[in-house]
Amino acid sequence: MGPSILRLENLGKRYSPSRPALFERLNLELREGEYVAVMGESGVGKSTLLNLLAGLDRPDSGRVLLDGIELSVLDDDAATLLRRRAVGFVFQAFHVLPYLSVSQNVALPLDLLAVAEPERGERTRKMLQAVGLEALAGRQARDLSGGEVQRIAIARALVHRPRLVLADEPTGNLDARSAAQTLALLRAQIKDNAGAGILITHSRAAADTADRILLLDSAGLNPLRSAG
């Protein structure tokens, strides 16, 4: 197994001193090539957990380390730069820009990182090829199907080769066939890029595509199925 990418150490979060903690004492380590699914009932804090892992929110106790860097000690600018470089998001609602072309949408993370041509064009082309959209590179995103738009979202999340991929219910709006293709693609790209990935899902079928399945509840973050 490769080096550690993500560590959670006794992570806790609450939204009011007068209310019980949303969760506390969460511990997890992900190494290169690991892909885990997190399941749990609505309201247990799955989206909050993703925000903490990306440095968009700060824990009330414990810490999150991404490549050994503690996120909560970074100021907003430093956290943004680390997130831009090291994290890739796949959202359930896609968040693809409809009036940009497929290639322009996918290249956005590279633009933000000031990756110059010809490298930017080559990496965008290779990622479009990987997700089966190379022939649609010049089409506007608004003209594509839901499954094609979701593949744009995956390509955009992976084109900058992030260390950590966070996928929040990425197949919630897809039919069964498109969902299976999306999950296979997401897993393959995480493995090929030697990153780590976390899939948030309500679907056991989706979760079964991961190496491990973890259940988030009031007792913490515990295995439903271990690797192997």
Image: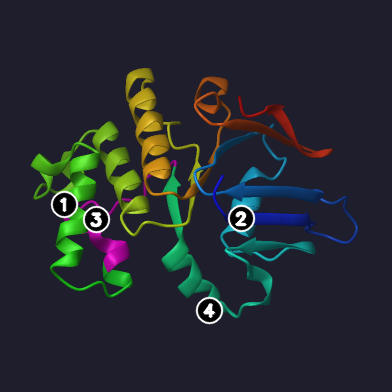
Q: Which secondary structure lies at badge 2?
A: strand
Which residue in the structure is indicated by mark 3? 105
Q: Quadrant of the C terminus?
A: top right
Question: Label 2 neighbourhood size at 10 Å, few (<14), some (14-19), many (20+)?
Answer: many
Q: Quadrant of the N terminus?
A: top right
Residue 110 falls in which quadrant of the image? bottom left
Q: Which secondary structure lies at badge 4?
A: helix
Q: Badges 3 and 2: C-beta atoms under 8 Å apart?
A: no
Mark nearer the N terminus (1 vs 2): 2
- Give the distance between the C-alpha atoms of the residues marked 3 and 4, in whole angstroms: 24 Å
Which residue in the structure is indicated by mark 1? 125
Say which mark, if any, is on residue 181.
none
Give the magenta range. Answer: 92-110
- Give the distance between the C-alpha atoms of the residues marked 1 and 2, in whole angstroms: 29 Å
Q: Badges 1 and 2: C-beta atoms under 8 Å apart?
A: no
Image coordinates of residue 75 in percent, x first then y, are 60, 80
Mark nearer the N terminus (3 vs 2): 2
Q: Which secondary structure lies at badge 1?
A: helix
Question: Label 4 neighbourhood size at 10 Å, few (<14), some (14-19), many (20+)?
Answer: few
Which residue in the structure is indicated by mark 2? 6
- Give the distance between the C-alpha atoms of the residues marked 1 and 4, in whole angstroms: 29 Å
Q: Residue at x 87, y 53 (%)?
A: 19
Say which mark, if any, is on residue 78.
4
Query: Closer to the observer: label 3 or label 2?
Result: 2
Q: Badges 2 and 4: C-beta atoms under 8 Å apart?
A: no
Mark nearer the N terminus (2 vs 4): 2
Mark nearer the N terminus (1 vs 4): 4
